[in-house]
Image (cartoon, rainbow, N blue to C red):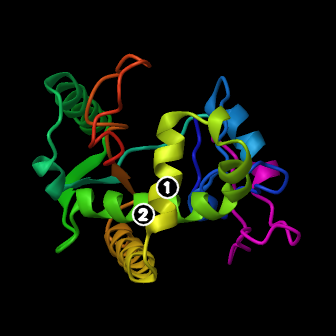
Amino acid sequence: VLKPPPGRMRVRGVRPWYGQLDVVGTLARSARDLAVLAAALTQYDPEDGASIEPGRAIDWAVPVSPAVDGLRIGRLANMDAVDMEPAVAGAFAHALQSLRDIGCEVFDVAMPGLELEEVVRHGVTITRADAAVIHAADYENRRGELSPGLVENLEIGRRLSAREIVEAGRARDEARLAVRRVLADCDMIALPTAPQVAFPLDQPAPDNQPVF
């Protein structure tokens, strides 16, 4: 699975969902297959307003025997404040130890003043505001066909103030800068996908489900 940051993979022709934070991900059987897809789909698209022209070309080729010895992997120190289920915490700790065993350097990294839950809250504000605009016609004309959860999010988005939206955008930019600073000292950041194991589809998502 490869989920690039917004703007790296073209989204022209894809029905938007949450606008600014929409991304197209890929699924493949191997890292090499993902690399082939990424090489084709991450080309700059001048007809896609969200597409970002990279400052340098990305070499997606996967080496036959990739070297990981000495790879620097950061673990967010403030993730200890997140309420993770024991199964997730145990699996994540095991994964980090496995990386150490094959020669990676794993160490804690800090993002002073950055609270993961606050970042998620502001991200949700951005997505709700975008969705309220993108899906305005569906809300007005087909509300009865939409799920209750979607209707609730669209209504919240329609009530957001300009101040709330601007504050969310500024918080997103601050979080982006914090991540860039961390990546100046390490090659990647390791995180669990979610703080809990998979939950039944017919149950509400936990409040902190998207925290990572």
- Local crowd size for mark 2, using a 10 Å CA cut-off: few (<14), some (14–19), many (≥20): many
Indicate yes or no whether the magenta region holds residue 54: yes
In the foreground, 56 or 77: 77
Inspect this view and state whether residue 8 appears. no
- The residue at 17%/26% (across/down) is 90
> Residue 151 location in percent, x, y?
53, 44
Determine which residue is flagged by label 2.
125
In this picture, which residue range is highlighted in magenta? 39-63
Q: Amino acid at mark 2?
A: Thr
Inspect this view and state whether residue 113 appears. yes
Q: Measure how far apart labels 1 and 2 are at the Cα level.
A: 12 Å
User: Quadrant of the rendered structure where residue 21 is?
Assistant: bottom right
Q: Is 115 above or below relative to 142? A: below
Determine which residue is flagged by label 1.
155
In the foreground, 177 or 48: 48
Report the number of discs.
2
Where is the N terminus found, in terms of image quarters? top right
